Image: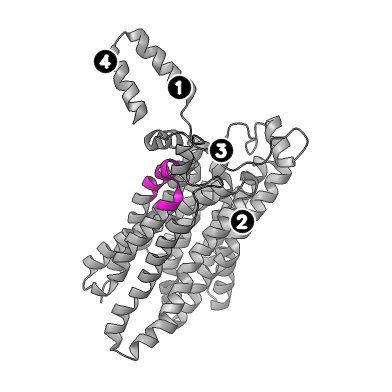
Amino acid sequence: GISKQQIWTSNICSVAGTVFMRFINGPMCDKYGARVLMGVLLMLCSIPCACTGLVNSAASLSILRFFIGLGGSTFVCCQFWTSRMFTKEIAGTANALVGGWGNLGGGVTQIVMGTVLFPLFKLGMTPDKAWRTVCIVPAVVGFCLGFLIIRVSDDAPKGNYNEMKKNGTMPEVSAAASFRSGAANINTWILFLQYACCFGVELTMNNAAASYFKSKFELTTESAAAIASIFGWMNLFARGVGGFVSDKANARMGMRGRLIWQTGLLVVEGILVFVFSNSNSLGAAIFIMVFFSSIVQSAEGSTYGIVPYVNPPVTGSIAGVVGAGGNLGAVGFGLGFRQLETKQAFYLMGGTIIASGVFTFFVNIKGHAGLISGEDSEEVIAAYKKTAGGAPAQTLQVPEPDVEAVKEIEKAASEAGSAVEYNEFLGHLKD
């Protein structure tokens, strides 16, 4: 067996791998599109998944989970892809539905593996060999799906990125410039923190809920696991509801509506953590967990209803940073549960969530009203109210260079009179 600390270490390694790739995937989506990246990652990460049966120590478990965790970064491709295919006015619903059903897939896989495939494999081999072999099935499914994505899907409504670049409908894009632009926006990091306090909480609860119910209410492992799985099943509708309500709030009040909804969800979520951790009745704890889970996942959907507005041409990079925030949140909260008493860890998590909701007051997106200050531009108002004179709804802009910044740097370089430095600068632009 392995200790509690070793289990949490493997959990942290898993999300650490995802964090690493999410930062990379964002700007790569802006440059190459989501289709190829998602397909390749699914195929590559099916290899460590198939190797699960080779694990024989805590160290090898942590290493394997790190590499499998890289596949979790396909979430960024997924959110960028939906933002690319749907207009911003309904991107909240679209992003939330695909994200929620993606998370639901993890719970469905656990049930299918544990109740259907594992018993089936045991018919022809020992239980030990059966669990070591059964993970080949999801690996094969993942590999085949990755291949199909590359072969039959499109990057954008107008086609694939390589075709668009050839016919001149899309310029060549610098992944580094895209990341710099996205990371330099303060709104990106506020959403990074807030996503850490919703998706990070979901991942932490997925890892902690079963052991919590088992120890607090003295349940069997099977009963505790079954109750804990309810948290993930809320993805069936809750994340979609969060994005849908965000879109409806935007239709009535513009960005301010989205921000009010986001703040309310996070504050209520934080309060529910305190309530859940102090519930001494099993029935009450389950009821509160269902409500708590619904709010957590609604906040996830709400967050990605805001992301496409922050800086549309570099949405991939922003989605990558924000998505990484979710996994870093899981690492942080996981360390809390690893080092602290369970109740203290819950209190730390609840207080952090409520504090993150306050940061919505500092969100300031160009052309849009903030939570308590600023006004939507006339163009924005016309777009979300669909009044005459408003621009027609469009999908995401393709990433483009900052023309004004380029002109300023060119002027400074010319005045400096250094032809060498100027040519180096032009070379960097081409890169």
Element type at marker 1?
Answer: helix
Task: Confirm or deny contact between disc 4 and disc 3 (CB under 8 A).
Answer: no
Q: Secondary structure at mark 2?
A: helix
> Any mark on residue 242, and which?
2
Q: What is the span of residues highlighted in magenta in the rendered image? A: 22-36
Residue 426 pos. (x, y %): 34, 22
Disc 4 or disc 2, which is closer to the eye?
Answer: 4
**Residue holding disc 1:** 405
354 or 44: nearer the eye? 44
Confirm whether the magenta stretch covers residue 33. Answer: yes
Q: Earlier in the sequence, mark 1 or mark 3?
A: 3
Horizontal side of 419 relative to 328 (left or right) equals left
Residue with the mark numbered 4: 420
Measuring 57% from the left and 40% from the top, which residue is drawn there? 309
Crowd around label 3: few <14 · some 14–19 · many ≥20 (10 Å): many
Q: Amino acid at mark 3?
A: Val
Determine the residue positioned at 54% across, 44% down. Answer: 307
Measured in 3D between alpha carbons, the distance from the residue under mark 1 to the one under mark 4, in whole angstroms, is: 20 Å
Percent x, y of residue 138:
39, 71
Q: Which mark is residue 363?
A: 3
Q: For the residues carrying marks 1 and 3, which lies nearer the camera in this image?
A: 1
Identity, as a three-letter code, of the amino acid under mark 2: Gly
